[in-house]
Amino acid sequence: MIKGNLVLKDFDIEREAGGAEKPIVKKFNASVTQNTLKIQFYWAGKGTTGIPTRGVYGPLVSAISVDP
């Protein structure tokens, strides 16, 4: 959600990027009010809570940039 508005539903970042550790860029327009931009991520209840084998695990979002 950006500023309280849902912008992507059921978004699979790994599928969209074509695998783990690959950058992806998404652009959205948002108004900044009172010097605050609020961005929220919600877990869809999918995925694993355990690590079955050695591999790439952890957060898939490592950076967000904002252009004025």
Image (cartoon, rainbow, N blue to C red):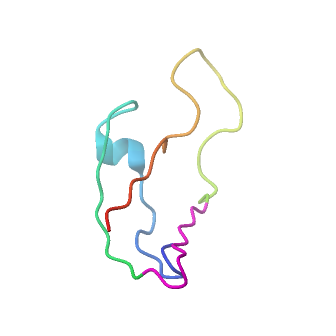
Residue 67 higher or lower than 55, as above or below:
below
Q: Please tell me which residue is depicted at 53% across the width and 18% down the height of the picture.
A: 55
Horizontal and vertical percent position of residue 40: 57, 66
Q: Is residue 26 left or right of residue 52?
A: left
Q: Is residue 51 left or right of residue 35?
A: right
In this orientation, which residue lies closer to the viewer: 28 or 45? Answer: 28
Q: Nearer the viewer, residue 67 or 30?
A: 67
Percent of width and height locating residue 44: 59, 60
Magenta stretch: helix, strand or loop mostly: loop
Q: Quadrant of residue 68?
A: bottom left
Instruction: Give the x, y percent position of residue 27.
Output: 28, 64
Tell me which residue sits at (48%, 82%) in the image: 5
Q: Is residue 66 magenta?
A: no
The span shown in magenta is: 32-42
Work out whether residue 13 or residue 27 is closer to the camera in this orientation and state it: 27
Q: Answer above or below: position of 19 versus 41.
A: above
